[in-house]
Amino acid sequence: MQNSISGHPARSSSARAGMRKVGALAAIFAARSIYGKTPVAEDGKDMLEVNEQTADVFALANAKLYWDETYDRFIITPFNRFGRWLAERLDWAFWHDFVHERILKDAYNAVESYRLDDDDTRYSGSELVVRNLT
């Protein structure tokens, strides 16, 4: 199997795979020791929220979740909309449709029709080739 970035053969590391398995099992064991058979405290709160040692970390993680939602709403979404506008309106509609298809193409056709026009007839690209060959 080839690595798509460097082109060198991909190497599988059994040591890395083993470390990942140990990490996953440690996370499962830690979750089992924290939550046990009752994942929710008597008052309906999370066990990490109730525990005094983990309450601050739980509050920080919970606040980060709200920050991520706010960041997505006010930064990421407007940025993506602006990028879509740049791609569709500025790049495609203006540069391609207006500048290339109208200004440059019409200017080229005007110069070519002036240069090749000896009987006041406009020629298309294929007719120009045929006309120049005859």
Image (tube, rainbow, N blue to C red):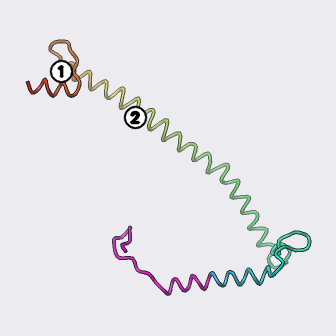
Q: Quadrant of residue 102?
A: top left
Residue indicated by mark 1 = 115
Q: Residue furthest right?
A: 43
Check whether the beta carbons of the residues at disc 1 and disc 2 lie within 8 A of each other. Answer: no
Location of residue 90 with respect to 63 vertically, above or below:
above
Q: 7 and 69: which one is in front? A: 7
Location of residue 60 with respect to 111 vertically, above or below:
below
Please give the label number shown on residue 96. Answer: 2
Magenta-colored stretch includes residue 78: no
Q: Amino acid at mark 1?
A: Arg
Q: 1 and 19: which one is in front? A: 1
Is residue 30 found left or right of 46 in the rendered image? left
Quarter of the image that includes the N terminus: bottom left
> Which SS class for mark 1?
helix
**Residue at 71% from the left image edge and 58% from the top image edge:** 67
**Residue at 57% from the left image edge and 82% from the top image edge:** 20
Please give the label number shown on residue 40. Answer: none
Q: Position of residue 97 (x, y in %)?
A: 41, 31
Counting residues from the start of the chain, the first of labels 1 and 2 encountered is: 2
**Residue at 80% from the left image edge and 82% from the top image edge:** 36
Say few, some or many: other residues with alpha carbon within 10 Å of mark 1 (under 14 / 14 to 19 / 20 or more).
few
Q: Amino acid at mark 2?
A: His
Magenta segment boundaries in residue numbering = 1-23
Q: Position of residue 9 (x, y in %)?
A: 35, 76
Magenta-colored stretch includes residue 11: yes
Location of residue 18 with respect to 115 vertically, above or below:
below
Is residue 33 found left or right of 107 in the rendered image? right
Q: CA distance from mark 1 to mark 2?
A: 26 Å
Say few, some or many: other residues with alpha carbon within 10 Å of mark 2 (under 14 / 14 to 19 / 20 or more).
few
